[in-house]
């Protein structure tokens, strides 16, 4: 039941494509789960690993380069959370990829790349 619930979360907030693209499936196949469990824990919904108390959000104001924070409309890193973090970075820009979740670069590749290209063009 837990794994079913995880997959439901993933299909809403990680990748909304059906079936998942080969790039994503392969990434899961190649993932170092021992490292993941050590650093994060047995479940991504409850950090118990070495990163559980890691927080550098108070240091974001030290970033002194133009910064793009990009996420999907249905991302597990919610648009509001991305706006909140970007607000702490002096020269940050937030872009939301519509009809995408965490893997907007796979789900809405053209829209994602257009936002990335526009950001990079603004750096010239």
Image (cartoon, rainbow, N blue to C red):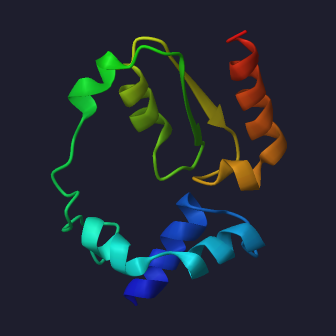
Q: Residue at x 77, y 48 (%)?
A: 108
Can you name the residue that lies furthest to the left here?
A: 53
Residue 12: quadrant of the picture:
bottom right
Percent position of residue 29, x then y: 59, 81
Percent coordinates x, y for residue 122 in the rendering: 71, 11
Whether residue 45 is visible, yes or no, is yes
- Outermost residue on the right side: it is 110
Give the residue at x 24% y 66%.
46
Quarter location, residue 21 = bottom right
Q: Which quadrant, please, contains the C terminus?
A: top right
Count of all numbered marks drawn on residues in the image: 0
Quarter of the image containing the N terminus?
bottom left
Indicate the position of residue 35 as horizontal and vertical percent values.
Answer: 35, 73
Corner quadrant of residue 26: bottom right
Q: Name the foreground residue: 2 vs 108.
A: 108
Specify whether 35 is left or right of 95: left
Q: Residue at x 31, y 17 (%)?
A: 61
Residue 82 vs 101, above or below: the answer is above
Q: In the rendered image, is residue 21 in sight?
A: no
Residue shown at 38% from the left, 85% from the top: 2
Q: As rendered, which of 68 and 101 lies closer to the eye?
A: 68
> Does residue 103 lie above or below 32 as drawn?
above
Task: Residue 19: give x, y in percent of width and height.
Answer: 76, 76
Residue occupying the far bottom of the picture? 1
Quick check: 67 left or right of 25? Answer: left
């Amino acid at each position: 039941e837990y794994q079913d619930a995880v997959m439901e979360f993933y299909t809403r907030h990680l990748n909304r494509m059906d079936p998942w693209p080969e790039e994503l499936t392969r990434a899961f196949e190649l993932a170092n789960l021992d490292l993941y469990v050590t650093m994060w824990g047995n479940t991504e919904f409850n950090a118990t690993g070495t990163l559980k108390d890691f927080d550098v959000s108070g240091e974001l104001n030290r970033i002194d380069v133009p910064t793009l924070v990009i996420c999907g409309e249905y991302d597990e890193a919610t648009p509001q959370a991305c706006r909140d973090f970007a607000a702490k970075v002096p020269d940050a820009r937030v872009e939301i990829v519509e009809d995408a979740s965490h893997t907007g670069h796979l789900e809405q590749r053209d829209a994602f790349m257009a936002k990335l290209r526009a950001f990079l063009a603004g750096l010239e």
